[in-house]
Image (tube, rainbow, N blue to C red):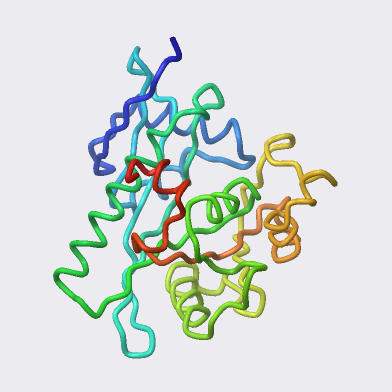
Amino acid sequence: MTEQLTGTVHRPGEVSADQRARMCDLLNDFFENVSREQFEADLAEKEWVFVFTDAAGTVQGFSTLMRLNVTVDGRPVVAVYSGDTIIHPDFWHEMELPKLWGKHVFDLAATVHAATPEAKVYWFLISSGYKTYRFLPVFFENFYPTYRQPTPPEIQRTIDALARYKFGEQYDPATGIIRFATSAPLRDGVAEVDERRLKNRDIAFFVEKNPGHAAGEQLACLVEIDHANITAAGMRMLGMA
C-alpha cells in the first residue's frame, strides 16, 4: 500500500523548531543558496503554512501562503501569494497538496467576495522552474503570461502592481522577471530543460519568457481564483469534481 501524506494548515508561529529544521533541509535538497536565516525570514512574513507529514509524523513537504492587497484601476485586488513549496519526491504522486491548497484558497476567495463583492481575487506566483509553471495549464483555463494569448492590459497592470508591491526594484516590468539580490536557483537535475521538454509549448514559452531561469530568475504569473477558471483535470486534482 502506498504511504499517504496528511496535510494541516498552521500559522507560522505554530510550526515547531524540529519541523522548521526539516522544512529547511527539504528546501536545501532542491535549491542552492538556502540559508536558515533567509528561510526563517520568508516563513515569518507568511500568513499560513501547509505542512504535510507521513504516517510516522515526519514532514515530507510544505507550502506557504500570504495575502497581498493592492488597488488596480480603482478596484481592490486581493492576491494569494505562494512562497516556498516542496514535496519529497517519494510523495510526488500525492494529491494532498492541491486539495488542501484549493480548499483554503477558494474558501478565502469566497470570504473576500462576501465582504467586498467588487474585489478581484488572484493567485500570484513566481516561477524559476518549468515544473511550477506547468501547474497553470493543468489546473486553470486562463492564466498569464501564456503563448495562448497576449496578456490583457488590465492583467498586466495587476501583475506589475503586485510584483512592485512585493519585490520593489527587484522586479523588472519590461520583462516580467524578478531578480533577487541573492538568488536560489534549482539544483542541477531538478528541472533540466532538454530538446524533448522544449517540444511542449508551455515549457518552450516559459524558457523564452524567463531565459535566466537556471540562475534563479523568477517569472511573475497570475491566475484568477474562480471556479469557472478551473480545468476538468484541475477539478479532480483539487478535489472539486
The residue that appears at 70% across and 66% down in the rendered structure is 209
Please, is residue 240 above or below residue 149 in the view? above
Residue 55 position within the rendered picture, expressed as x and y whole percent measured from the top left? 34, 14
Depth order, front residue of 26/133? 133
Which quadrant, please, contains the C terminus?
top left
Closer-to-camera residue (125/203) = 203
Q: Nearer the viewer, residue 4 or 184?
A: 4
Q: Is residue 16 above or below residue 162?
A: above
Residue drawn at the location 36% of the way across and 24% of the way down: 53
How far across and how far down the image is residue 10, in percent?
25, 40
Total marks shown come to: 0
Q: Locate residue 220: give its quadrant.
A: bottom right
Along the horizontal axis of the image, is 36 left or right of 122? Answer: right
198 lies left or right of 226: right
Image quarter in which the N terminus is found: top left
Q: Is 186 in front, or is 144?
A: 144
User: Residue at horizontal 65%, vertical 58%?
Assistant: 217
Specify whether 78 is left or right of 83.
Answer: left
Residue farthest to the bottom, as pictured:
74
Residue 65: percent from left, percent from top: 36, 51
The residue sitting at the left extreme is 115
- In the displayed image of the protein, which residue is found farthest to the top? 1
Residue that protrudes farthest toward the right in the picture: 195
